[in-house]
Amino acid sequence: ETGVTQTPRHLVMGMTNKKSLKCEQHLGHNAMYWYKQSAKKPLELMFVYNFKEQTENNSVPSRFSPECPNSSHLFLHLHTLQPEDSALYLCASSHEGLAGGNEQFFGPGTRLTVL
Amino acid sequence: ILNVEQSPQSLHVQEGDSTNFTCSFPSSNFYALHWYRWETAKSPEALFVMTLNGDEKKKGRISATLNTKEGYSYLYIKGSQPEDSATYLCAFYGGSQGNLIFGKGTKLSVKP
Protein backbone atom coordinates (compact mmCIF):
# COMPACT_ATOMS: atom_id res chain seq x y z
CA GLU A 1 0.00 0.00 0.00
CA THR A 2 1.61 3.23 -1.12
CA GLY A 3 -0.57 5.60 0.86
CA VAL A 4 -1.72 7.29 -2.33
CA THR A 5 -5.02 6.12 -3.76
CA GLN A 6 -6.66 6.97 -7.05
CA THR A 7 -10.19 6.43 -8.30
CA PRO A 8 -11.40 5.24 -10.65
CA ARG A 9 -8.71 2.81 -11.80
CA HIS A 10 -10.20 2.61 -15.28
CA LEU A 11 -12.38 5.11 -17.11
CA VAL A 12 -13.90 5.08 -20.57
CA MET A 13 -15.53 8.29 -21.68
CA GLY A 14 -16.88 9.92 -24.80
CA MET A 15 -15.53 13.19 -26.14
CA THR A 16 -18.56 15.13 -24.88
CA ASN A 17 -18.54 13.69 -21.37
CA LYS A 18 -17.44 15.40 -18.16
CA LYS A 19 -15.67 13.23 -15.63
CA SER A 20 -13.30 13.66 -12.68
CA LEU A 21 -10.30 11.73 -11.44
CA LYS A 22 -9.69 11.66 -7.72
CA CYS A 23 -6.47 11.27 -5.76
CA GLU A 24 -6.07 11.02 -2.01
CA GLN A 25 -2.89 10.75 0.01
CA HIS A 26 -2.65 9.55 3.59
CA LEU A 27 1.00 10.46 4.13
CA GLY A 28 0.71 13.98 5.53
CA HIS A 29 2.45 15.45 2.48
CA ASN A 30 2.05 19.06 1.36
CA ALA A 31 2.70 18.72 -2.35
CA MET A 32 0.64 16.81 -4.91
CA TYR A 33 1.15 16.22 -8.62
CA TRP A 34 -0.67 15.03 -11.73
CA TYR A 35 1.33 13.16 -14.36
CA LYS A 36 0.35 11.77 -17.75
CA GLN A 37 1.92 8.77 -19.36
CA SER A 38 1.13 8.12 -23.00
CA ALA A 39 2.32 5.03 -24.85
CA LYS A 40 6.08 5.04 -25.50
CA LYS A 41 6.54 8.43 -23.85
CA PRO A 42 8.07 9.33 -20.50
CA LEU A 43 6.00 10.51 -17.60
CA GLU A 44 4.97 14.12 -18.23
CA LEU A 45 4.21 16.47 -15.39
CA MET A 46 0.87 18.25 -15.79
CA PHE A 47 0.23 20.13 -12.56
CA VAL A 48 1.88 20.74 -9.20
CA TYR A 49 0.17 21.88 -6.02
CA ASN A 50 2.21 22.97 -3.01
CA PHE A 51 0.28 23.73 0.16
CA LYS A 52 -2.93 23.77 -1.93
CA GLU A 53 -1.55 26.41 -4.29
CA GLN A 54 -0.92 25.57 -7.93
CA THR A 55 2.76 26.19 -8.63
CA GLU A 56 3.19 24.54 -12.02
CA ASN A 57 1.02 24.19 -15.09
CA ASN A 58 3.02 22.68 -17.89
CA SER A 59 1.07 24.13 -20.82
CA VAL A 60 -1.78 21.71 -20.27
CA PRO A 61 -4.92 22.30 -22.39
CA SER A 62 -7.84 23.86 -20.56
CA ARG A 63 -9.94 20.73 -21.07
CA PHE A 64 -7.96 19.43 -18.05
CA SER A 65 -8.83 21.35 -14.90
CA PRO A 66 -7.16 20.52 -11.57
CA GLU A 67 -8.58 21.18 -8.14
CA CYS A 68 -6.87 20.84 -4.76
CA PRO A 69 -9.37 21.52 -1.94
CA ASN A 70 -6.88 20.50 0.77
CA SER A 71 -3.44 18.98 1.09
CA SER A 72 -4.79 15.44 1.07
CA HIS A 73 -7.03 15.55 -2.00
CA LEU A 74 -6.43 16.32 -5.64
CA PHE A 75 -8.88 16.17 -8.51
CA LEU A 76 -8.51 16.33 -12.26
CA HIS A 77 -11.70 17.44 -13.99
CA LEU A 78 -12.01 16.31 -17.59
CA HIS A 79 -14.19 18.00 -20.19
CA THR A 80 -14.48 17.49 -23.97
CA LEU A 81 -11.38 15.36 -24.20
CA GLN A 82 -9.86 14.08 -27.42
CA PRO A 83 -8.91 10.47 -28.26
CA GLU A 84 -5.22 11.46 -28.00
CA ASP A 85 -5.81 12.21 -24.31
CA SER A 86 -6.15 8.48 -23.71
CA ALA A 87 -3.33 7.62 -21.33
CA LEU A 88 -2.43 6.56 -17.80
CA TYR A 89 -2.88 9.43 -15.34
CA LEU A 90 -0.77 9.16 -12.22
CA CYS A 91 -1.07 11.14 -9.04
CA ALA A 92 1.88 11.61 -6.70
CA SER A 93 2.66 13.38 -3.45
CA SER A 94 5.79 14.49 -1.63
CA HIS A 95 6.83 16.32 1.49
CA GLU A 96 7.10 20.05 0.79
CA GLY A 97 7.66 19.78 -2.94
CA LEU A 98 10.84 18.69 -4.67
CA ALA A 99 13.20 21.08 -2.90
CA GLY A 100 15.58 19.15 -0.70
CA GLY A 101 15.42 16.13 -2.96
CA ASN A 102 12.16 14.73 -1.63
CA GLU A 103 11.05 11.52 -3.26
CA GLN A 104 7.59 11.22 -4.74
CA PHE A 105 5.02 8.66 -3.73
CA PHE A 106 2.78 7.55 -6.57
CA GLY A 107 -0.73 6.21 -6.78
CA PRO A 108 -1.64 3.26 -9.02
CA GLY A 109 -3.00 5.48 -11.78
CA THR A 110 -6.22 5.82 -13.74
CA ARG A 111 -6.23 4.25 -17.20
CA LEU A 112 -8.31 6.65 -19.31
CA THR A 113 -9.74 5.80 -22.71
CA VAL A 114 -11.45 8.52 -24.72
CA LEU A 115 -13.71 7.26 -27.49
CA ILE B 1 14.36 21.43 -23.79
CA LEU B 2 15.86 19.25 -21.07
CA ASN B 3 16.46 15.63 -22.02
CA VAL B 4 16.86 12.60 -19.80
CA GLU B 5 18.02 9.50 -21.65
CA GLN B 6 18.02 5.96 -20.35
CA SER B 7 19.77 2.98 -21.86
CA PRO B 8 19.20 0.29 -22.74
CA GLN B 9 15.48 0.56 -23.45
CA SER B 10 15.01 -3.08 -22.40
CA LEU B 11 17.14 -5.81 -20.94
CA HIS B 12 16.66 -9.56 -20.57
CA VAL B 13 18.87 -11.41 -18.10
CA GLN B 14 18.96 -14.78 -16.39
CA GLU B 15 18.35 -15.19 -12.69
CA GLY B 16 21.62 -14.68 -10.85
CA ASP B 17 23.12 -12.33 -13.44
CA SER B 18 24.28 -8.92 -12.34
CA THR B 19 23.26 -6.03 -14.53
CA ASN B 20 23.46 -2.28 -14.84
CA PHE B 21 21.86 0.51 -16.81
CA THR B 22 22.48 4.17 -17.45
CA CYS B 23 20.68 7.45 -17.01
CA SER B 24 22.06 10.56 -18.78
CA PHE B 25 20.92 14.03 -17.79
CA PRO B 26 21.93 17.69 -18.20
CA SER B 27 25.16 18.46 -16.37
CA SER B 28 24.16 22.07 -15.66
CA ASN B 29 21.75 23.30 -12.96
CA PHE B 30 21.78 19.91 -11.27
CA TYR B 31 19.82 19.59 -8.04
CA ALA B 32 18.79 15.94 -7.67
CA LEU B 33 18.52 12.65 -9.53
CA HIS B 34 15.73 10.23 -8.67
CA TRP B 35 15.49 6.51 -9.42
CA TYR B 36 12.12 4.74 -9.35
CA ARG B 37 11.12 1.14 -9.86
CA TRP B 38 7.77 0.46 -11.57
CA GLU B 39 6.36 -3.04 -11.56
CA THR B 40 3.53 -3.84 -13.95
CA ALA B 41 0.08 -2.96 -12.55
CA LYS B 42 1.64 -1.29 -9.50
CA SER B 43 2.68 2.23 -8.52
CA PRO B 44 6.17 3.58 -9.21
CA GLU B 45 8.24 3.26 -6.06
CA ALA B 46 11.20 5.45 -5.13
CA LEU B 47 14.56 3.69 -4.89
CA PHE B 48 17.01 6.55 -4.44
CA VAL B 49 17.23 10.32 -4.46
CA MET B 50 20.80 11.43 -5.09
CA THR B 51 22.08 14.96 -4.74
CA LEU B 52 25.88 14.88 -4.31
CA ASN B 53 28.44 14.29 -7.06
CA GLY B 54 30.21 10.99 -6.42
CA ASP B 55 27.42 9.77 -4.21
CA GLU B 56 26.75 6.05 -4.06
CA LYS B 57 23.58 4.63 -2.52
CA LYS B 58 22.60 1.06 -1.81
CA LYS B 59 19.38 -0.76 -0.98
CA GLY B 60 19.80 -4.51 -0.68
CA ARG B 61 21.13 -5.82 -4.01
CA ILE B 62 20.48 -2.54 -5.80
CA SER B 63 22.95 0.33 -5.83
CA ALA B 64 23.36 3.57 -7.75
CA THR B 65 26.19 5.98 -8.48
CA LEU B 66 26.08 9.62 -9.54
CA ASN B 67 28.38 11.80 -11.66
CA THR B 68 26.90 15.29 -11.90
CA LYS B 69 29.88 16.80 -13.75
CA GLU B 70 29.45 14.52 -16.74
CA GLY B 71 25.71 14.03 -16.29
CA TYR B 72 25.17 10.33 -15.72
CA SER B 73 24.01 7.85 -13.11
CA TYR B 74 24.33 4.07 -13.11
CA LEU B 75 21.93 1.65 -11.44
CA TYR B 76 23.36 -1.77 -10.57
CA ILE B 77 21.49 -4.92 -9.62
CA LYS B 78 23.57 -7.73 -8.17
CA GLY B 79 22.35 -11.31 -8.58
CA SER B 80 19.09 -10.46 -10.38
CA GLN B 81 15.95 -12.24 -9.23
CA PRO B 82 12.63 -12.66 -11.10
CA GLU B 83 11.02 -10.21 -8.67
CA ASP B 84 13.43 -7.53 -9.92
CA SER B 85 11.55 -7.54 -13.23
CA ALA B 86 10.21 -4.01 -13.61
CA THR B 87 10.75 -0.75 -15.45
CA TYR B 88 13.41 1.42 -13.83
CA LEU B 89 12.88 5.15 -14.25
CA CYS B 90 15.29 7.95 -13.57
CA ALA B 91 14.26 11.59 -13.21
CA PHE B 92 16.29 14.81 -13.17
CA TYR B 93 15.45 17.77 -10.98
CA GLY B 94 17.09 21.04 -11.87
CA GLY B 95 15.88 23.09 -8.94
CA SER B 96 14.62 26.33 -10.43
CA GLN B 97 12.72 24.58 -13.23
CA GLY B 98 10.29 23.26 -10.63
CA ASN B 99 9.61 19.73 -11.78
CA LEU B 100 11.05 16.29 -12.39
CA ILE B 101 12.03 15.37 -15.94
CA PHE B 102 11.66 11.62 -16.43
CA GLY B 103 13.43 9.30 -18.82
CA LYS B 104 11.50 6.64 -20.74
CA GLY B 105 12.85 3.91 -18.48
CA THR B 106 14.73 0.64 -18.81
CA LYS B 107 12.50 -2.43 -18.79
CA LEU B 108 14.23 -5.34 -17.05
CA SER B 109 13.06 -8.93 -17.42
CA VAL B 110 14.71 -11.59 -15.27
CA LYS B 111 14.13 -15.18 -16.34
CA PRO B 112 14.18 -17.95 -13.73
Image (cartoon, coloured by chain):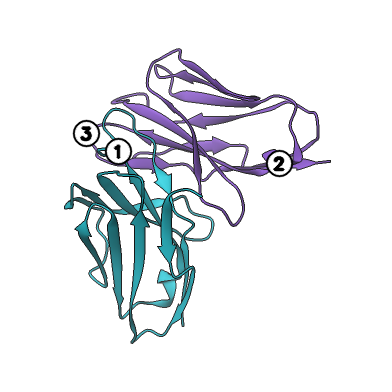
In the picture, one chain is purple; tell me its letter. Answer: B
In the picture, one chain is cyan; tell me its letter. Answer: A
Looking at the image, residue A84 lies above or below residue A59: below
Residue B60 located left or right of residue A69: right
Q: Position of residue A67 (x, y in %)?
A: 22, 63
Q: Quadrant of residue B62?
A: top right
Q: Are marks 1 and 2 in contact (CB under 8 Å)?
A: no
Q: Position of residue A36 (x, y in %)?
A: 40, 58
Q: Badge 2 sits on which subunit?
A: B
Q: From mark 1 to mark 2, how far is it between C-alphas?
A: 29 Å
Q: Badge 1 sits on which subunit?
A: A
Residue for badge 3: B96
**Residue A61 circle label:** none
Q: Position of residue B95 (x, y in %)?
A: 26, 31
Residue B48 located left or right of residue A60: right
Residue for badge 1: A95
Q: Quadrant of residue B7?
A: top right
Please identify the quadrant where the N terminus of chain B is shown: top left
Crowding at mark 1 (Cα within 10 Å: few <14, some 14-19, many 20+): many
Q: Nearer the viewer, mark 2 or mark 3?
A: 2
**Residue B83 circle label:** 2
